[in-house]
Image (spheres, rainbow, N blue to C red):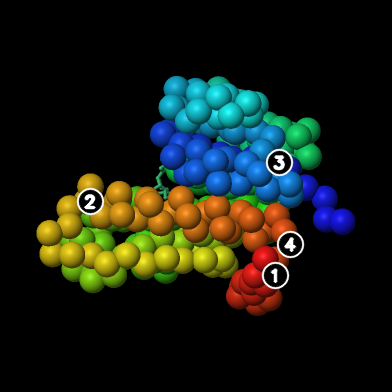
Amino acid sequence: MTKAKNVAIFISGRGSNMEALMHNCKDDPLINFCLVFSNNASAQGLEIAQNFGVETKAFNKKEFESADAFDDAIIALLREKEIDLVCLAGYMAIVSAKVIHAFPNKIINIHPSLLPSFPGLNVQQKAIDYGVKVAGCTVHFIDEKVDHGPIITQKSVEVNHNDTQETLTEKILVQEHKIYSEALKLFCHDKLEIIDRIVHVNNI
Ligand code: GAR
């Protein structure tokens, strides 16, 4: 029988994606939420995680002598907890190549655009300013380029002429919560295979 995967979630703020993952996957026997890490000790999501009974840790690059020492602390923490998968959920920092290489194809991210359109920050406003008629969100494995790695799943939403950054962000967020939970389940049920950057999905 497949063994449950130990999952860590990395957040920097509100943590609504983290909360959706924990809520939607709480009864899945193959998903074991072990750790929530934040690079921001006052992230709202830390309290939500504690209410779910999940251990939290928070530390910041500035507390370390070097970026390398910070990376070593992250890697040690993930190894100590025997983490099988890291879900970046509103983690507003670049994950270094060192950490990515320590956990190859074991770090996934949610991004509020239809990649490869609109990588980076403030992407809902950029989508409105560009005049796109369809926006959306993407769950992908991370690689060394920002918002670039193999795509697991995407969901589109319509952009109407009266959408503002707030309304579009909210519409996309509703879909983020759904597709991130689906992607997490697919990973933990060993349904994802990457061949030449294409993610092949075998439905559960
Ligand atoms: C989400 O919209 C997520 O897609 C985005 O930040 C928000 C975090 O909200 N992430 C990025 O932009 C990463 N580049 P949450 O803390 O409520 O999940």
What amino acid is found at the position of numbered circle 3 in the picture? Asn
Element at label 3: strand
Image depth: mark 1 or mark 2 in front: 2
Q: Earlier in the sequence, mark 4 or mark 2?
A: 2
Q: Is residue 59 visible?
A: no
Q: Earlier in the sequence, mark 1 or mark 2?
A: 2
Q: Residue furthest front?
A: 27
Give the camera-side residue of 190 and 1.
Answer: 1
- In the picture of the structure, the residue carrying the numbered disc 1 is 193
Mark 1 residue CB less than 8 A from any atom of ligand 1: no
- Alpha-carbon span between mark 4 and mark 2: 35 Å
- The disc placed on residue 190 is 4
Q: Horizontally, is 24 left or right of 132 in the view?
A: right
- In the picture of the structure, the residue carrying the numbered disc 2 is 167
What amino acid is found at the position of numbered circle 4 in the picture? Asp
Element at label 1: strand
Q: Position of residue 7 (x, y in %)?
A: 68, 43
- Alpha-carbon span between mark 4 and mark 3: 14 Å
Image quarter (top left, top right, bottom left or bottom right) of the N terminus: bottom right
Mark 3 residue CB less than 8 A from any atom of ligand 1: no
Q: Position of residue 5 (x, y in %)?
A: 75, 47
Q: Horizontally, is 34 left or right of 63 in the view?
A: right
Tag 2 near tag 3, CB within 8 Å: no
Q: Is residue 37 visible?
A: yes
- Alpha-carbon span between mark 3 and mark 1: 21 Å
Q: Position of residue 8 (x, y in %)?
A: 64, 40
- In the picture of the structure, the residue carrying the numbered disc 3 is 32
Q: Is residue 158 above or below residue 173?
A: below
Q: Earlier in the sequence, mark 4 or mark 3?
A: 3
Q: Position of residue 29 (x, y in %)?
A: 73, 47
Q: Residue at x 46, y 50 (%)?
A: 177
- Alpha-carbon span between mark 2 and mark 3: 33 Å
